[in-house]
Amino acid sequence: MLFKLESVKLDRGGEPVLKVLSARLPDGISAVVGPSGSGKSTMLRLLNRLSDPESGSVHFRGTDTRELDPLQLRRQVALVPQLPALLPGTVLENLRFAAGFTGAEPDPGELLNLAGLEASFADRDVKRLSVGEQQRAMLARAMATQPEVLLLDEPTSALDERTRDSIERTVAGLRRQLGTSIVIVTHDPAQAQRLADWVVKVDRGRLVREGPTREVLA
Ligand SMILES: Nc1ncnc2c1ncn2[C@@H]1O[C@H](COP(=O)(O)OP(=O)(O)OP(=O)(O)O)[C@@H](O)[C@H]1O
Ligand SMILES: [Mg+2]
């Protein structure tokens, strides 16, 4: 199993956000679905130790994540957050910064193309990007580290249909060509249908259902 959450509890601002959440995420493409405020983003952040549970445990390929070095884990398991957060500078500087962690020399044209942006965006100051373009630059930056697992938090929420389709093709292609596992948070069941082999449905910080997409979204 890629990830296993067992009886995870997590409070935020004194309120319980995840309450005895247990869930499994296999290799492949998994979708996390559920209403706004149900704890999807909070759950995703547990997977690469951007937060740790107050009780319960998170296992990554059978190892308790608390035994793993957070920085090394985040190189293997990259998160693209719901709200874009690029570093000041150009898109290329952001790609180089991310790739620097792996020692790889990024091919900016290829990364941008995968994320649905023209190569000319490399020299663009991130202050001059739309939110949808920032989302795609964040995706390109996450791919620059060649992670084993990509965690995508609503990656197409600010995009039109055509760009969304192109991102979905990229996600499916990463799985097919590089064997990358992907966990995608989406509010759109149709997107989960199109992309995911496995669906985890949460509500109010608890698991509602998990299983193959066909069964859960039937
Ligand atoms: N920093 C914080 N401080 C206090 N409460 C928080 C904080 N972050 C999130 N919460 C609360 O935790 C709950 C779950 O938030 P989370 O962002 O995980 O939901 P979500 O399922 O991703 O929602 P959305 O679909 O709107 O993105 C919400 O009720 C939210 O108000
Ligand atoms: Mg969210």
Image (cartoon, rainbow, N blue to C red):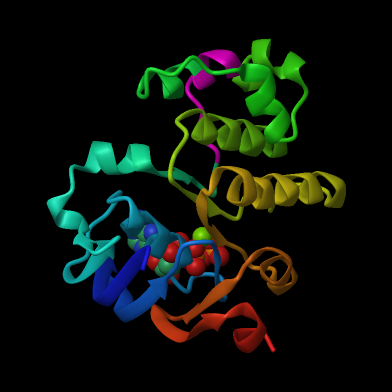
Q: Is residue 129 above or below residue 159?
A: above
- Res. 56 in view: yes
Residue 180 drawn at (x, y percent): 51, 48
- 216 inside magenta stretch: no
> Toward which corner of the image does residue 117 lie, by quadrant?
top right
- 90 inside magenta stretch: yes
Q: Is residue 155 above or below residue 127?
A: below
Q: Is residue 169 left or right of residue 148?
A: right
Which residues are drawn in magenta?
Answer: 84-95
Q: Residue furthest top?
A: 123
Q: Is residue 65 above or below residue 16?
A: above
* Residue depicted at x 69% and y 73%: 189
- Res. 130 in view: no
Number of numbered tags placed on the structure image:
0
Residue 69 drawn at (x, y percent): 18, 42
Towards the viewer: 133 or 198: 198
